[in-house]
Image (spheres, rainbow, N blue to C red):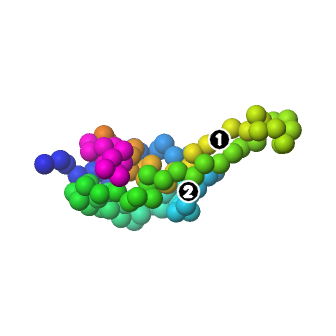
């Protein structure tokens, strides 16, 4: 049986998200995760452990919103844009935890 995720593992993963980044359809910014404190951390660790035990992840965490960002020069030329894929920040936190089966469940969410 796999071990549960720990608060320490969550806190290590929480060092990676950056502030002022785009949010996905769930509208949860990284700032919410970073500033959520011990109470939110406990809730998310419990949620992630429950999900791992059920071998389930939300479909929304596998969805991407594609956005075009203007790089420079004229805005009428599509070559002056670059695309970015925006995914759930909570889903990215789950994927940042130690690579037990969490990455496999995110990759195989539809299978």
Q: Is residue 106 magenta?
A: yes
Q: Secondary structure at mark 1?
A: strand
Q: Position of residue 72 (x, y in %)?
A: 81, 36
Q: Residue at x 23, y 59 (%)?
A: 54
Task: Give the number of the disc on residue 83.
Answer: 1
Task: Tell which residue pokes out farthest to the left in this image.
Answer: 1
Disc 2 element: loop
Instruction: In this rendered view, identify the residue nearer to me: 75 or 9.
Output: 75
- Residue 40 in sight from this viewpoint: yes
Which disc, if any, is residue 24? 2
Camera-nearest label, 1 or 2: 1
Tell me where residue 100 appears, x and y as whole percent. Answer: 26, 42
What residue is rendered at 40% in x and 58% in y? 59
Residue stretch in magenta: 100-111
**First of labels 1, 2 by sequence position:** 2
Residue 2 numbered tag: none
Q: Is residue 78 left or right of residue 74?
A: left
In the image, is residue 79 above or below residue 90? above
């Amino acid at each position: 049986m796999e071990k549960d995720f720990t608060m320490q593992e969550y806190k290590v993963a929480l060092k990676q998200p950056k502030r002022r980044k785009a949010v996905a359809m769930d509208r949860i910014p990284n700032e919410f995760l970073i500033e959520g404190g011990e109470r939110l951390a406990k809730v998310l660790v419990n949620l992630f452990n429950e999900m791992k035990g059920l071998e389930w992840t939300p479909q929304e965490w596998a969805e991407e919103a594609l956005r075009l960002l203007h790089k420079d020069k004229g805005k009428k030329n599509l070559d002056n844009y670059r695309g970015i894929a925006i995914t759930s920040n909570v889903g990215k936190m789950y994927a940042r935890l130690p690579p037990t089966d969490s990455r496999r469940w995110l990759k195989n969410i539809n299978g």
